[in-house]
Amino acid sequence: MVGAAAMAAAVVAGCSSDPGAGSGTGPGAVPDKPSATSGGAGSPGAAPTSTPTLQASGAPAFGSPSSTPTGPPIPTGAALRELLPTAATLPAGWRIEGNGSENDSGTYVLEEPAKPVLPQEPCTQMRLAGSVLSLDYRASGATNEVYDGENRVEVYLGAYHAGDAAKLLGEIRAYADRCTSFTGKGIDGKAIPLTVTLQPVPGLGDEAVDVKKVPQGPYHSEEIVVTRLGDRLLFLSGDNILGRLPNLMQLAVPLSKTAR
């Protein structure tokens, strides 16, 4: 049964889950990681590359280490790592396996992060994961993964220079807005319509949004909650490969109080 399900699993271009996550969806789907054939709402017919232009890892953002930091001190990735959830701080029903695949950007801070790329990212390459969406302007970061039952959730905490966290959250809003409806392509060649929604989350951090990407048909959906905490952004993301989306808000509320 498991082998058959894996053979039938599918992911729409721009709908794949995070690297390291399990692949596959519900019955009747086709294999994961198809190529994209159509552009976003603003560029119909475009043919984006098969490899996302955004890095999909927890590695440090592009740029140079800071030698003479200015303004309020920005925490290093190693310091942010101490603020990630642990088995002792997770809500009831949540768990962590081993060290939670912890990773961080090290003991330095980027003084001049690279030019942002999200404004040009094709809709068909959209991945709702903090390790991807956090990259623009990021000075440092740390990540781990936890589980809501059997549902994996990526936790990413990024630190930014003054004003850049708000700027990136604006980029994410604009990205979701221009990609409200687009078409991806399954590995079997079938066109898959997708919709993207973004809702504000009142009362969470300084500002927060909940973004969902939903394909039409038996393919898995993705969700991410992004919370701004001053000049930091907390990203919580997951999918419904195992039948339901994780309860991201159950984790976002307590973490938004401890990750500042």
Image (cartoon, rainbow, N blue to C red):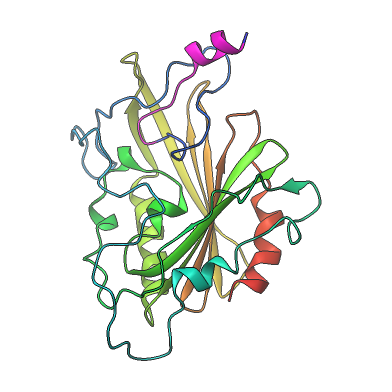
* Residue nearest the observer in this picture, 167 or 45: 167
At x 65%, y 38%, the residue is 151
Residue 203 visible within the image: no
From what the image shows, is residue 194 above or below residue 165? above
| Left or right of residue 199, residue 245 in this image | right
At x 45%, y 21%, the residue is 10
Please state the total of marks drawn on the protein image: 0
From what the image shows, is residue 171 above or below residue 32? below
At x 54%, y 23%, the residue is 25
Q: Quadrant of the C terminus?
A: bottom right
From what the image shows, is residue 19 above or below residue 37? below
Q: Is residue 3 magenta?
A: yes
Q: Is residue 120 magenta?
A: no
Residue 119 x/y as whole percent: 26, 57
Residue 254 visible within the image: yes
Q: Using the rendered view, name the quadrant where residue 1 is placed.
A: top right
| Left or right of residue 259, residue 64 in this image | left
Query: What stretch of residues is rendered in magenta?
Result: 2-14
Residue 81 x/y as whole percent: 54, 66
From what the image shows, is residue 88 above or below residue 220? below
Which residue in the rendered view is the most extreme toward the bottom? 71
Residue 32 x/y as whole percent: 42, 23
At x 36%, y 46%, the residue is 56
* Residue nearest the observer in this picture, 218 or 7: 7
| Left or right of residue 85, residue 154 in this image | left
